[in-house]
Amino acid sequence: MEQERENDECSEYTEEEIEEVDDDSLVFVEAESNGLDLQQFVSNVIGKVRKVVTLFRRSPLQNEILQRHIQRQFNAELKLILDSKTRWNSLLEMIEKFVTVEKCIRMALVEVGSSVTVTDREI
């Protein structure tokens, strides 16, 4: 009964109020419209981040290309972190590092001709 009330309250928003919602909230709405729930959407994004990190960590040549972009932007060598199930905080560290060098990652992915892409909505 209480859940029905909550659903009714959500449907009372006007279009203007809905348009004022920030982009982060729109990601959830977009995921739902594609038939994904939030947990599935987040899992997909984390899987993509792991795939990109693994791509650069396994290939010295591709990592060198990434490091060139990072060196230009940050004037330092920053290595991507891959999360580990035994380190409870490693997922957060992986995502923080990924977001920090996200522009460099995008440029490097294009340069190496990778089929993996990262969209603004996923970041």
Image (tube, rainbow, N blue to C red):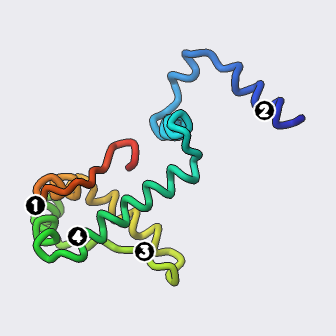
Nearer to us of marks 4 and 1 is 4
Q: Dot 1: few (<14), some (14–19), or many (≥20) neighbours within 10 Å?
A: few
Find residue 56 and name its label.
4
Mark positioned earlier in the residue sequence (2 or 3):
2
Give the Cα separation between the discs numbered 3 and 1.
26 Å
Labelled disc at residue 72:
1
Classify mark 3: helix, strand or loop.
loop
Residue flagged by tag 2: what amino acid is it?
A: Glu
Q: Position of residue 50 (x, y in %)?
A: 37, 66
Q: Quadrant of residue 75?
A: bottom left
Mark 4 to mark 2: distance in Å? 45 Å
Question: In the structure shown, which secondary structural element does the residue marked by tag 4 occupy?
Answer: helix
Task: Tell me which amino acid carries mark 3.
Answer: Asp
The amino acid type, in three-letter code, at marker 1 is Arg
Query: What residue is disc 3 on?
Result: 83
* Cα gap from disc 4 to disc 1, whole angstroms: 17 Å
Mark closest to the chain's N terminus, 2 or 1: 2
Residue 10: horizontal and vertical position, in percent? 70, 27
Dot placed on the residue nearer the N-terminal end, 4 or 3: 4
| Mark before the other along the chain sequence, 4 or 1 | 4
Residue in the picture at 51% in, 40% down: 31
Q: Which residue is mark 2?
A: 6
**Foreground mark, 2 or 1?**
2
Q: Describe residue 64's horizontal placement relative to residue 99 as left or right.
A: left
Marks 2 and 3, how far apart at CA:
37 Å
Disc 2 is placed on an element classified as helix
Amino acid beneath label 4:
Phe
